[in-house]
Image (spheres, rainbow, N blue to C red):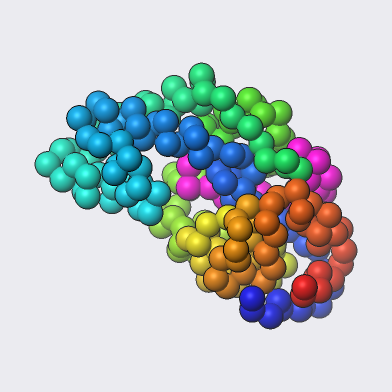
Amino acid sequence: MTSEPTHPSSPRYVLFDVDGTLIDAVANQRRVWERWAAGYGLDADAVHQVALRTRPMETFSVVAPDRDPHECLAVLHELEDEDVRSGVYAAFDGASQLLAGLPPGRWALVTSNYEHRVRGRFARTGLPVPDVVVDAASVDEGKPSPLPYLLAAARLGAEPKDCLVIEDAPSGVESGLRAGMTVWGVNAPTPVEGVHRHFGSLREAVADILAFAAEPCRASQV
């Protein structure tokens, strides 16, 4: 792990990734890609393995290079929207307690998904939605670009150095680090490279995240 930076006293802000961090959507994502693959007569497992590593447009170029990528994306979006309406979703243990305990106006969601789907999933799981949601339509460059997290900080009126990013995936961790923020990893068996702290589950991180948001100085390195 890298050394966690320290800064003078100032308000603290927490920026959350959504899928894999607050919402357990692994089974849903796999089901959506399986249905998409079936519609094109493709091997579902092979498609899903590519989709785990790339963005949708990049996935299409690999698994269906002869297909119109915009058509492929439209079909995928229809399947994702249907899954939000009818799929079974669960929040990770500790998510409800954590979000309810954060100071209003001091946290945001930064997701590679779209806001209407995030709101649908949060409604299904009973999680509160903050005032600031940075989604795939909010920025020209998604994670691992720093732009999504920098935009969230700007909308909160926060300096990047005062923001804590909670992520589960390498691209999100890189995005937060490149934005000059403190980054903690959750829901992974081993630390993602670069994180300042690592927690095996979101539940394990709840008390520390709330302490970070409540205290006028940064949490100490562990």
The foreground one among 16 and 139 is 16
Q: How many marks?
A: 0
Residue 179 seen in render? no
Q: Residue furthest top?
A: 86
Coordinates of residue 100 in the picture (x, y in percent): 80, 40
Coordinates of residue 17 in the picture (x, y in percent): 59, 50
Residue 16 seen in render? yes
Residue 216 is inside the magenta segment:
no
The foreground one among 209 and 151 is 209
Coordinates of residue 69 in the picture (x, y in percent): 22, 41
Q: Residue at x 67, y 64 (%)?
A: 198
Q: Residue at x 40, y 31 (%)?
A: 32
**Quadrant placement of the N terminus:** bottom right
Q: Residue at x 56, y 25 (%)?
A: 88
Q: Residue furthest right?
A: 215
Position of residue 4 relative to residue 12, above or below, is below
Q: Is residue 220 left or right of residue 70?
A: right
Coordinates of residue 95 in the picture (x, y in percent): 73, 42
Position of residue 70 relative to residue 125, above or below, is below
Residue 109 is inside the magenta segment:
yes
**Quadrant placement of the C terminus:** bottom right
The residue stretch that appears in magenta: 96-113
Q: Is residue 90 left or right of residue 68?
A: right
Position of residue 36 relative to residue 142, above or below, is above
